[in-house]
Amino acid sequence: MNEEREKEEEAVEKRELIKDGKRLDGRGFEELRPIKIEVGVLKRADGSCYFELGENKVIAAVYGPKEMHPRHAQDAKMAVVKFRYNMAPFSVDDRKRPGPDRRSVEVSKVSREAFEPVIMREFYPKAAIEVYVEILQSDAGTRTAGINAASVALADAGIPMKDLVSSVAVGKIDGQVVLDLNGTEDNHGEADMPIAMVARTNTITLLQMDGHLTAEEFGRGLKLAMGACRQIYELQRAALIERFSSSNSGSKSEKGGNKNGT
Amino acid sequence: MNEEREKEEEAVEKRELIKDGKRLDGRGFEELRPIKIEVGVLKRADGSCYFELGENKVIAAVYGPKEMHPRHAQDAKMAVVKFRYNMAPFSVDDRKRPGPDRRSVEVSKVSREAFEPVIMREFYPKAAIEVYVEILQSDAGTRTAGINAASVALADAGIPMKDLVSSVAVGKIDGQVVLDLNGTEDNHGEADMPIAMVARTNTITLLQMDGHLTAEEFGRGLKLAMGACRQIYELQRAALIERFSSSNSGSKSEKGGNKNGT
Amino acid sequence: MNEEREKEEEAVEKRELIKDGKRLDGRGFEELRPIKIEVGVLKRADGSCYFELGENKVIAAVYGPKEMHPRHAQDAKMAVVKFRYNMAPFSVDDRKRPGPDRRSVEVSKVSREAFEPVIMREFYPKAAIEVYVEILQSDAGTRTAGINAASVALADAGIPMKDLVSSVAVGKIDGQVVLDLNGTEDNHGEADMPIAMVARTNTITLLQMDGHLTAEEFGRGLKLAMGACRQIYELQRAALIERFSSSNSGSKSEKGGNKNGT
Amino acid sequence: MGLEIMDEIKQNYVANLVASGKREDGRGFREFREISVERGVAERAEGSARVKIGDSDVLVGVKLDVGAPFPDTPNKGVIITNAELVPLASPEFESGPPREDSVQLARVVDRGIRGSEAIDLERLCIEEGEKVWIVFIDIHILDNGGNLVDAAALGAISALLNARIPFEKWGLPAPAGEGEEEEGRESSRLPIRETPVAVTTAKIEGKILVDPNVNEENAATTKLTVISNADGSLSGMQKSGSGGLKEDEVLEMVELGIEKAGEIRENFL
Amino acid sequence: MGLEIMDEIKQNYVANLVASGKREDGRGFREFREISVERGVAERAEGSARVKIGDSDVLVGVKLDVGAPFPDTPNKGVIITNAELVPLASPEFESGPPREDSVQLARVVDRGIRGSEAIDLERLCIEEGEKVWIVFIDIHILDNGGNLVDAAALGAISALLNARIPFEKWGLPAPAGEGEEEEGRESSRLPIRETPVAVTTAKIEGKILVDPNVNEENAATTKLTVISNADGSLSGMQKSGSGGLKEDEVLEMVELGIEKAGEIRENFL
Amino acid sequence: MGLEIMDEIKQNYVANLVASGKREDGRGFREFREISVERGVAERAEGSARVKIGDSDVLVGVKLDVGAPFPDTPNKGVIITNAELVPLASPEFESGPPREDSVQLARVVDRGIRGSEAIDLERLCIEEGEKVWIVFIDIHILDNGGNLVDAAALGAISALLNARIPFEKWGLPAPAGEGEEEEGRESSRLPIRETPVAVTTAKIEGKILVDPNVNEENAATTKLTVISNADGSLSGMQKSGSGGLKEDEVLEMVELGIEKAGEIRENFL
C-alpha cells in the first residue's frame, strides 16, 4: 500500500494522472470504482444502506414519515424532506472538526433537492422524512455515494418514490474527461462534476460543476455520467431485490409497518 | 485624497484637531457634515431610506406591521419593535467579522428605545414592526445616521408615529465642544455623546456619553445637539415631502397598502 | 498565607501530601473541611442557600414549581427538574471563560439525577423546578458543595422531598484513602470519588470515580463517604431548623407561598 | 414553509403566463432585466461594486488582509467568500446563523472565481509559507428581486477588478510587475486574469428562460446557474430547486448561459 | 413580553405612589437604599468586591492575565468587562447567550472605567507591542433587586481598588513605582487613578427619583445612568427604557447623579 | 420528554419480565449480548475499531495531530475525546450542539483512559513545552441498541491499540523504543500500557443485570458504569439515571463489572 502511494505521489508531482491510457489506479477512462451495497444495515432506522465506492464508505439512514417539528415548519400539502450529510471527524486525512460546515450545508441542500422530484411528498402532508448520511471514509465522491446510499435507504424504509435516484461524478484529469474521480485525481484534476439522475426517465436532479471545462467537454461528460448512473441504478435495484427476498424470509420482520414488501 | 489624509495624520499626531478656529475637514465647531437623504430606495421593504452623513453611508428598511414570531414574544397590547443595526464587513478599515457583536447589540437596543416613545405601538397589538439598518460605510456617527434613516423609513412605510426622530452626536476635541465628530475626531477626541430627539417636542429619546466632559460642557453639548436635531428634522421632512409628491405621481404605486398618502 | 502556600508547594513536589499522619492542611484522614451554611440568602429566589466547604464558596437558588417552557418539554406526569451548575469566571486560578463547558454540562446532569429520587415530582405535573448553583470560589469539591447547597435551597423553597440529599467526596493521596480532598490534594492525588446520598435511607444518588482505586479501597472509600454524608446531613438539618425558627419570627414572611413553615 | 395564499396565486399567474409564452414584466425568455454596475461605492473597502439587475440590488466589498497561507498551498493567496442575506433585503431572510441559501450563494460565486482561476493567487504570495494576501469577498444583499446569484457574481468580479492591494498600509513593497502602471504607486491592482460571469436560467412549465425575477423564481421548479469565461469555457455550475432536467434542457441552458455571459462581459466588465 | 397580571398591578401601585410623592419602601426621591461594599471576598480572583444596594447583590471579580496588546495601542494594557445575568439572580434571566441587558450592563460599566481613565493602562504594559496585562472585570449578579448598574459599577471600581498584580506568578518584575509600598512585594496594586461612580435615576409619572428598586424599574418609562468622577466631571452616560426626557429633566438627573456619586464615593471608596 | 404510549408499554413489559427473573432477549442477568470488534475499519484514521454489542454499533476513530501541550503538563501528549450521537443512530438523537448524553458518554470514556493511564502520555512528547502528539478519539454512534458506553469504551481502547503514530507524515523521527518492532518503520504503535474496559449494569425492579439493551435502559431507574483494568483495579465509575442505589447494590455492581471486564478483555483485546 505504501509503495503504491509513493509511486502515486511521484506520478502526481509530474502531473501524470494518466499513463499508458490508464489511470493511476488502473481504471479506464469510463470505468467506475468498485461498488458494494448492503441494505438494512441499521436496526433503529426505518431504512438504511451501506455503500462503498472505491475507498469511500458511507452509510445512510431514513426515519419517517413522522411528525414534523417544529410545527411552524410543517407544509400543509406535503412532507418536508430533511437531508443531513455529515463527515465523521476521522473520515479524512486531517481530522475534521465535528459538526456542520459550509460545505456540508451545501451538499445537504443539493442532495435533498436531488430527491424532491421523486419522493411522493404529497402522500404525507405535515410530515417529515429524514435522511441521514454519514461519511465514514472519504476518497472523493462522497456526495454521490451518499445519494446512492440514501436512495436505497429510502426504498428500504418504504417511502413511496417514483423511482430510485442514482449519482456519479465525472471530471477532467490530464486534459481528459473521465468517470468517477478518486481522491488523488480530484486533488490534482482540472474539473469535477457530480450529477444525480432518475435513471429510468433520464431526469437530472443534481448537477454541479467545479473547475474548468469546455462546453464540448461538458456535453461529453454529462453523457458519460448519465450512462454510469444507469449502471449504478442496476446495482441499487439488485441490492434491493436481494434484500426483499431475504427480508421476506423474515430477518427484519419485527419492524413491520409501511415497508416495501413486508 | 491621499495627500489630505497624510496631512490629517500629521496634524493628529500633534493632537491638533483644531487649527485656526476650524476643524481638520474645514468645518466650524457647530457645523454638521453634509447630509443626503433618499427615500424609498428599496423595493421589497415596506419603507426604506438611504442616508449619507459625511462619509457615512447607511440604508434602513422597515417591514411591518406583521405577525410577531415567535408567538410567545408577542405583546397582547401593542406591537413589538425590532431593531437590527448591522455593519457590512467592508464598512470599516479593518474587515469586521459578519454578524452581531456586543457593540451592535447595544446600539440596536438603544436605537429601538429611541423609537418606542413615538411609534404608535398600541395600534397593532401582537404585531411586529421590524427596522433594519445596514452600515455600508462608516466614519463615526453611524448610529445617529442609522436612526435618522430608520425614522424616514418608518414614515415611508406608513407606520403611525407621533413624530419623526432625529439624531446627532456632539463631542469634545482639543478641549472644545463640537458638533458631529468625524472618524478622525472620534478616534483622537475626548468625548462622544450621541442623542436622538423628537424635534417638535424637544423630547430626548436616546442619550449616551462616552469619554470625559464637565457638567458644564455636557449642558452646552446637549443644547448644541438639540439644535442640530432640529436642522436634521427639517431635512428629513423635506425628503419625505419630495417623496410624497413624486410618489403621488405614481412611481411606487404598485406597493399600495398602508402608506402615508398613497 | 504565602509562606504556607510555598511550603505546600514544596511538599507537593516531593509528593508528600501526608506528613506525620496528618494532611497538609492539618486534617486527619477522615476529617471534613469546615462547613458553613446560610439559608435564605437571596431575595428573588423561592429558596436559597450559601454553602462553604473549606475554601469552596457556593450559592444555590431554587425557582418553582413553575410552568415548564418550552411546552413540548413538559412531562404530563411529573415536574421536570432543571439543574445548572456554573462557575464564576473568577472562581478559579486561571480565569474561566463564561458559559457552560463540557465539564459543567456533565456535573449539571449528575447533580440533577442526584435529586430526582427524592423530589416528589409527581405532585407537579407539567411544571419545572429550577435549581441554580453558582460556584463563587473553588477548591475541589464544588459539585458536592453545590449539591449540599441545592438540597437546603430546595427545602427552603418548600419543594416537597422525601428527604435531604447530602454529598461529599473521598479520594486517595499518597496511597491513602481520605475524606474530602482539597484543591492541592485533588491536583496531586490518585483518585477522587464524589457521592451523594439520602442520609436517612442510605440511598446513593450520585456516584462518580476518577483516577485509580483497588476494589478494596473503593469499598472502604464508599463507607467513609457515606458516614460523612450523615454528618453533613445533620448540619443541613440544623441550618434549616434555625432558618425555620427565625423565619417564623417573620424575617422573610413577605415571600409567602408554599414555604416550609411560613 | 407552506406558501401563503398570495404567493401561490402569484406563482400560478406567472406560471400560466410563461406557459403562454409571456413573462410578467414583458421580457423575452432570453432577455435579462436592466443591469447596472457601479464600482468603488464603498470607500473603506479595497474594492467594491454595486450591481443592480432589475429590482435586485447587491453590494460587494473586497477587503485585503495579510495572513498565513493554507499549509498545502504555501505560495498562494487565499480567497474567502461570504454572503449575508440580511433581513433588510427580503421578508424571507432572517437574522441568525447563515442558512443554506446564503451558504450556497457564497459558495457558487466562490466556485466561479476559483474555477476560472480569475485571481492569480501565486502573485498574492508575500513570503512563501508565511505571509500571503487574504482576499475577503463580502456579498451584501440589499434588495432581493430575484436572481441574486448572477448579481452577486457580477458584483464580485467587478469589485475584484476595482480592488487595489494596500501594500503601503502594511509596510510592504509593491507587488512585482503591477506597481508600474499606477500613478501614485500607493497601491496596485489585484492580479485578475479572467472574468467569470454567472447566468441563471430557470425552467417554468417546461420552458427555459433567463434571469428569473423573484416571482419567477418562486414559480420555477428548477434553476441552473452556469458560470463561463471569456473564451466560452465553463468554470462552475449549480442546479437548484426541487425539479429535474432533461439532457437537452441542460444543454439549452448551458448554451444560453454562455451566450448571455458574453453579452454581460462585453457591456459591464 | 407581555406583563403578567401581578406585575401590572405592582407597576400601577408603584406608579400611583410615586405620583403622590411616595416610594414603595418609604424612601425619599433623592435617597439610595442601604449600600454595603465588601472587598476581597473571592480569593481566587486578583481583586473582588461584593456590593449590595437594597436587595440587589452583585459580586465582581478581577482577574489578571498576560497577553498581547491591541495593535493600535501597543503600550497599553487591556480591559475586558463581562457581565453574567445568571438565572440564579432573577426569574427573568435565562441561560443561554448573553442578551442585550447583560451586554448593556457590561458596556456601561466598562464605559465609566474607560471614560474616566480609571486605570493607568500604560503602566500595565510589560513589553511594548508584545505583552501587557489583561484586566478581566467579571460581573456576577447574585440577586436582582433593581438598579444593577450602580451596584455593578461600584463593585467594579471596588474590585479594581482591591486587586493586586500577580507579577510573581508570571515570573515578572514588580511593576515600577508600585512595589515599594507592599510588604511581601509579592504583588502590587493596580494603578487606579480615578473612582468613577454610576448613579441611576428613573422617571416615573413625571417625577425623578434615584436608585429605583425592581418594581420601580418596571414602572419607570425611562432611566438615566450618570457616571461621574471625584471632581464632579462626567465619564459616561446611558439612557434606557422606552420613554423620553426633556432637557430640564436630563439636567436634573445629571445634577442628582453627580451629587449622589459624591456621597457614595466618600462612604465606600 | 413524556414517554410515548408504546415506550411506556414496552417499559412495563421489560420491567415485569425482569421482576420475574427473565430478560426480553432471553439472556441471564449476568450475560452480555454478542460482542464483535473489528479493527482498522476506517483507513483515513490512524487507528479505528467498530464495536457491536447486540444491536448497538459504534465506530471509533483515532486521529493524531501535532500541537502544543497544556502549560501545566509540558512533557505530555494530549487526549481529546469526543462523541457524536448523530441522528442516524436513533430517532431520539438530534442535530445541533452536543447534548448532555453525548457529553457524558465522551467524558466517561475519556475518564477510563485517563484514570488507568492507558496511554503513556510522556512518550507522546516531541519537544518539551512546544510540541506533543494530540490524540483525538472520535466516537461515532451508528446504531443505538442500548449500552453505548460499553461499546464506545471498548471501541476507544481497540482503536488506540490499532493506532500508529504518523511520524513520517510530519517529518519527525520514529518515537524512541517503539519503532524497532515495525517492519516498514513508517509508523509506530501508540504506547498503550493498560486496557480499561467499561461494564454497565442496570437496576430494574430491584434486580441487577449487565449490559442493558435499549428497552431495558428505558425501564432501568439506575445504571452504573464500572471501568476496570487488567489487575481488577478500578479506573472510573459513573452512576446515571434518576434512581438510587444501596451500598450492597453498588458493591454487587462493581464486582459484576470487574468480572465481566475480565472476560471482555480476554476475548477482545
Image (cartoon, coloured by chain):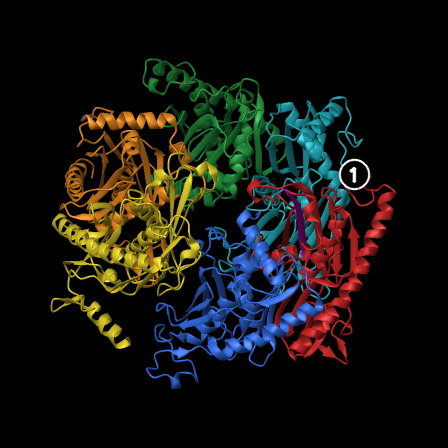
Chain colours: A yellow, B green, C red, D orange, E cyan, F blue
Residue linked to disc 1:
C256
Horizontal relation, residue C210 to residue B154: left or right: right
Q: Identify the residue at image location x=74%, y=67%.
A: C226
Q: Identify the residue at image location x=52%, y=22%.
A: B124
Find residue A161 and report its horizontal and vertical position in percent.
Answer: 30, 45
Q: Is residue F39 visible?
A: yes
Q: Is residue C133 magenta?
A: yes
Q: Dividing the picture into quarters, in which one does residue A50 lie?
A: bottom left
Find residue F54 and report its horizontal and vertical position in percent.
Answer: 47, 66
Q: Is residue A151 above or below residue D42?
A: below
What's the chain of the residue with tag 1?
Answer: C
Disc 1 marks a residue whose amino acid type is Gly
Q: Is residue F140 above or below residue C252?
A: below
Please report the bounds of the magenta region as a residue range.
C126-136
Horizontal relation, residue F134 to residue C133: left or right: left
Find residue B156 and report its horizontal and vertical position in percent.
Answer: 42, 21
Magenta span: helix, strand or loop, mainly? strand
Q: Quadrant of the N terminus of chain E?
A: top right
Q: Is residue E77 visible?
A: no
Q: Please tell me how many numbered marks the rendered image carries.
A: 1
